[in-house]
Amino acid sequence: MTAVRPETGTGTVRPQAAWGWWQRLDATSASMALGVAVVGIVALVALNGNYTGLVVTTGVGYAVVTVGMVAQIGYSHQLAFSQSVFMGLGAYGAALLETRYNQGVLVSMLAVIVGAVVVAYLIGAVVTRAPGLALALATLLLPLFLYELVTYSSYLGTFAGISGVLPLWSGETYAEGMVRTGVVAVIILAVVVWLVMRIMRSGVGLQLMALAADERLAEGMGVNLRKRRLGVFIFGSVLAALGGAIVASAQGIVTPDLVNESAEVTLLIMVFVPGRRNVIAAIVGAIVIEWLSTSTEFISTNLPTFEGALLILVLLIEPDGIVGLCQRGWEAVRRKRVERAVAAKEETA
Amino acid sequence: MTSMLDTGTSGSPVPDGQTPVLETRGLTKRFGGVTAVRGVTLALPHAGVYGLCGLNGAGKSTLFNLLAGALRADEGTVLFEGKDVTGLSASKRSRLGLSRTWQLVHLAGQRTVLDNVAVACLPSPSQSMILAPFRTQLRDARERARLVLDDLGLWHMHDRLAGTLTLEGQRLTELARAVADDPKVLLADEPASGLSGTQRSALADTLVHLGETRTVMLVEHDLDMLERISRYLWAMLDGGIAFAGRPDEFAGTHAHAALRGIQAARRTTDLRNLATPADENPPT
């Protein structure tokens, strides 16, 4: 009888203390998180707090959101249009606590997380009663509502927003503070990557997979649909709030642009174009789209048009995005290789 | 219709004094003005294969959905081991030990056969998402799934993606998943649909094997297969039970004539002339 493939793929190597610890973290998830941390920190240190460093740090904030969307939308098929709302909640929450109530970064971040859990629970308890597309529709009006709120509320700074948001880790110079903020953001992203990978590679991940395949099937196998829908909604929302707080810290200001009508679409594009089921693709997508939106005036002005066209193209050709296309191409190449090998063998015979 | 009920001489399949593992009393389900299931009363004993047959639109799949909790009954009760479970959801019934398969195969095509089965083997299915990264349960679930696949002789395909399997492979994977949690009752909805004669025969053997330790209720259009492997048979017509008895008592009944007649007609005439509205996916 063949042995079951071990969860960590580490075979039968006798673990030493450090290796055992690594195994407990799950080697695949931990390697990916470590890779993200190393690449991100090296890149930010190399950029030395310049403008591109600011763009990358902002992109990392968006990546925290999109990695959560991979779990919520890509993996569990729980399409909801509420990520920009929770990004706004996180950004405005951190900004208010730091500028109006003189709270430190750590306190404001923790408060944002707790607040996001509470708000996501209250909203989720209602909207996650709706299955599939109905869930998406139930959340459709939330971004419009929030945009109206922040633009008309003087407490929230109306169109000017709130400035003076603290960096995640300040330095003696602006550049130093930017690098340090970027490093903290990357470490948070690495932890989020590990969490999402671990959940997807767990029993709960299998249940979410069943939920995505067919809700009736999942329920028939004992999966508590409401609990799982609500759980994944809260998880994705909290990560969105965390990402929003990082973006606000990186930029030092939060404006209604963060939650305007195109913000939700941009987030969806960051996930769907590179590949909705792939954590690394979601990170790359967030950083690249953020970079494109600030690269040249022509691109930043016309980005929504490009994004819309690209999204339609991707959904028509390959719903799993660029990663899906690459996988299909690789499969085709592999199949051809096998066919050639078989043909060669037959010829020899 | 209940007025046309033919009963065999064997009475109920449940031995005297034994509590049925699954029982319905006067179960009725309506969709608008259509009564899909009308006043169905039946009882299943512990262990064995039991058959349910009927024409398209007779209400078999609706009855299955009522039993599994996918639909709520308008009237009547469902009892599981003597306890009223009529109001329980499908997930709660599943955790009590009531499992099912569907007419159309439902698998996660991009995951392996092992993972498709492991999803039904989690030691704590209601584990919190917060704890999931720290205690994944995956190793235990996959180990249990390995035993199930081994028992059904399916281990050789454990690492294949479910989407790449043949229909037979997919149906067997679904069956493995349905029994992975060792349910007391398995409701199998047309598991032989689309399979060849040889494949049907192998599937029948598997179902008999599964029925040795649990109750298997089987919906099937293949009357030969049903009569061969079932200990007891119910036939449905127009939403009601038209026959209840041993398979050897089925021949010569009104329901038997109706079902066999349709089958013979199907073999010899254009199916399109006989097409009746399918009831298999009623509006929910």
Image (cartoon, coloured by chain):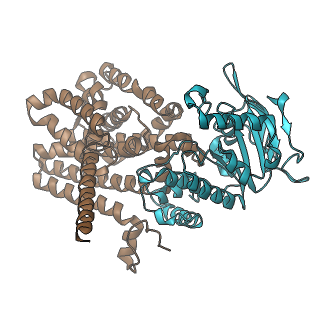
The quadrant where residue B267 appears: top right
Could you say which is closer to the camera, residue A14 or residue A231? A14
**In the rendered view, does B198 fall on the left or right side of B8?**
left
Residue B26 in view? no
Residue positioned most to the front? B268
Q: Residue at x 26, y 58 (%)?
A: A334
The quadrant where residue A302 appears: top left
Q: Residue at x 26, y 52 (%)?
A: A332
The quadrant where residue A23 appears: bottom left
**In the rendered image of this protein, does residue A56 appear above or below residue B161?**
above
**Which chain does the cyan colour mark?**
B
**In the rendered view, does B37 fall on the left or right side of A198?**
right
Could you say which is closer to the camera, residue A106 or residue A61? A61
Residue B212 in view? yes
**Which chain does the brown colour mark?**
A
Residue B94 position in % (x across, y down): 65, 48
Residue A211 position in % (x across, y down): 49, 44
Q: Residue at x 80, y 52 (%)?
A: B45
Residue A275 position in % (x across, y down): 29, 44
Could you say which is closer to the camera, residue A160 or residue B187? B187
**In the rendered image of this protein, does residue B81 appear above or below residue B63?**
below
Could you say which is closer to the camera, residue B97 or residue B92? B97
Residue A150 position in % (x across, y down): 32, 24
Quadrant in the picture for the C terminus of chain A: bottom left
